[in-house]
Image: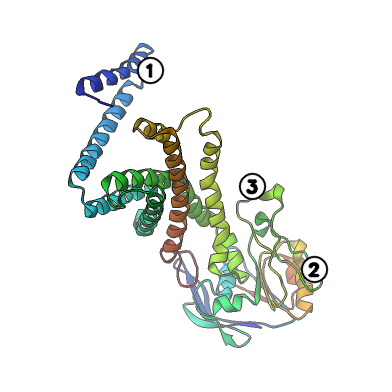
Amino acid sequence: MIELKDATLTRKGRLLLSNMSMMAQSGQLTCISGGQGSGKTALLEALLGFIPLDSGLVSVNGELLTALSAPTFRRRMAYVPQRHEEHAAVFVPRTSDLETIWSGPTAATWEPRPIVQPAVTLQGRDIVLADDPPLAMLGQLRALADEGRTVVVATERDEYLNISDKTIRLKD
Amino acid sequence: MKITILTFVIALLLLALPGYVLARLDLPLLKRSGRGVAIMVAQVAFVALLTWALWRLSSPWLCGLWLLAVTMVATWVLLNRSHLPLQRLFLPAWIGMTAAVAAAGVLTLLAVGADSLVAPRWVVTVSAVLTAHVLTTNIRGLSTYFETLRTDSTSYYAQLGNGASRPTALTPYVRQALRRMMEPTLATMAVTGLPVLPMLLSGLLMGGLSPLQATALFLVLTAAGLAASVGALLLTVWMADSYMFDKRGTLKP
């Protein structure tokens, strides 16, 4: 479970969130929707502890997420960034107990993609945060939520909104 | 070897041939070439004067200052050529370069059995060779590291978001920088010796060393140059960390 409470967030002088509260429960797929520039990515970044809130707090399973504790919490999270396809990322399970959210590129894809993503296991990760994932991941993200994980998806795609358990719409 | 002013001036007359060709073919390079040669002669003369003074004074302190000054200028050139922020990266890059050159230099002098670790004859020459190596290689290495991080930070945040530690998340960028840095050096190494005798080796031979000693010293200096380059890159990256990232690991604007 990941929770945002009374959060206000400003980026580059622009108010993105004002006293916003939300809770993404375990076993649910929570969608954050909103137009371009509405703050979906910034919200995910705040949940990951990358950017500080102006006020309010983020908690993970009831524990406060701070600049110091964020790296520890992130070990229990799986994160799919925007445009992850460009970085040779795929979301394909290898086995039932060892799934990968990222796969390293093959030798053929090394040259055009300078930066390599290592494989990240989903084992032991109960929170999945996906920023504008492709439709190809829809089934798998749903399945992860059904397994009991907390899945938060920032998206505008209707396909995701239709299968979500909860949708939070950010103001444009 | 004895160079007199007369023989030196006569030798410089060799420049008349390219000058004549440029003028004859009406190439618009004559002025630029002239200016380039003049600047080079002035710079070399200035450095020669300084080294002559160092030789005369033979002070370990001045040798240390010389090393600091050389690496300081090299760092300035490095950051300018790499189009990196001077204010933010000067200190880490300078410390990184100085420490790497000093460490590799001391090991080189120990390896070749130098009579003194602080004599200008050794400090000036070895630090010059190593600094030049670090400068040429790290222009590629550091610019690759910082530019890739700036333009393609998605991978960094992706790894961080997936629980990787900061050093782990930065490893692909360091790997990429090292790769870009080493490639030209390794390519040059592959053809060194057969088609062309390196300038450094030629200089050692002209300086009066036997071919075997000159070759050994050349190889030691090449190895030290590589070590200094890698060391300088890693130290700079490590020390630039707090200048580049905030406490959350987010890149500073």
What residue is shown with label 2? Answer: A139
Total residue callouts: 3
Q: Are marks 1 and 2 on the same chain?
A: no
The spot of residue B90 in percent (x, y) is: 35, 56
- Label 1–label 2 contact, CB within 8 A: no
Discs 3/2, front: 3
Label 3 belongs to which residue?
A112
Task: Label 2, secondary structure: give it.
Answer: helix
**In the rendering, at what x and y percent does residue B131 appear?**
37, 47
Depth check, front residue: B216 or B95: B216
Q: Is residue B53 left or right of residue B209?
A: left
Q: Is residue A25 above or below residue B156?
A: below
Q: Position of residue B234 (x, y in %)?
A: 47, 58
Amino acid type for the residue under numbered disc 3: Pro
Name the chain under label 1.
B
Where's the N terminus of chain B, which quadrant? top left
User: Callout 1: 10 Å neighbours few (<14), some, many (20+)?
Assistant: few
Q: Dot 3: what SS?
A: loop
**Residue drawn 39% across the image and 57% down it:** B96
- Which of marks 2 and 3 precedes in the sequence? 3
- Label 3 and label 2: CA atoms lie apart by 29 Å
The residue nearer to you, when weighing B113 against B107, is B113
Amino acid on which the number 1 mark rests in the picture: Leu
Number of residues whose C-alpha sits closer than 10 Å to that of mark 2, classed few (under 14), some (14–19) or many (20 or more): few
Q: Amino acid at mark 2?
A: Gly
State how far apart marks 3 and 1 are (Cα): 40 Å
How far across and down, in percent of the image, does residue B95 sit? Answer: 36, 58
Q: Which residue is mark 1?
A: B27
What is the chain letter for disc 3? A
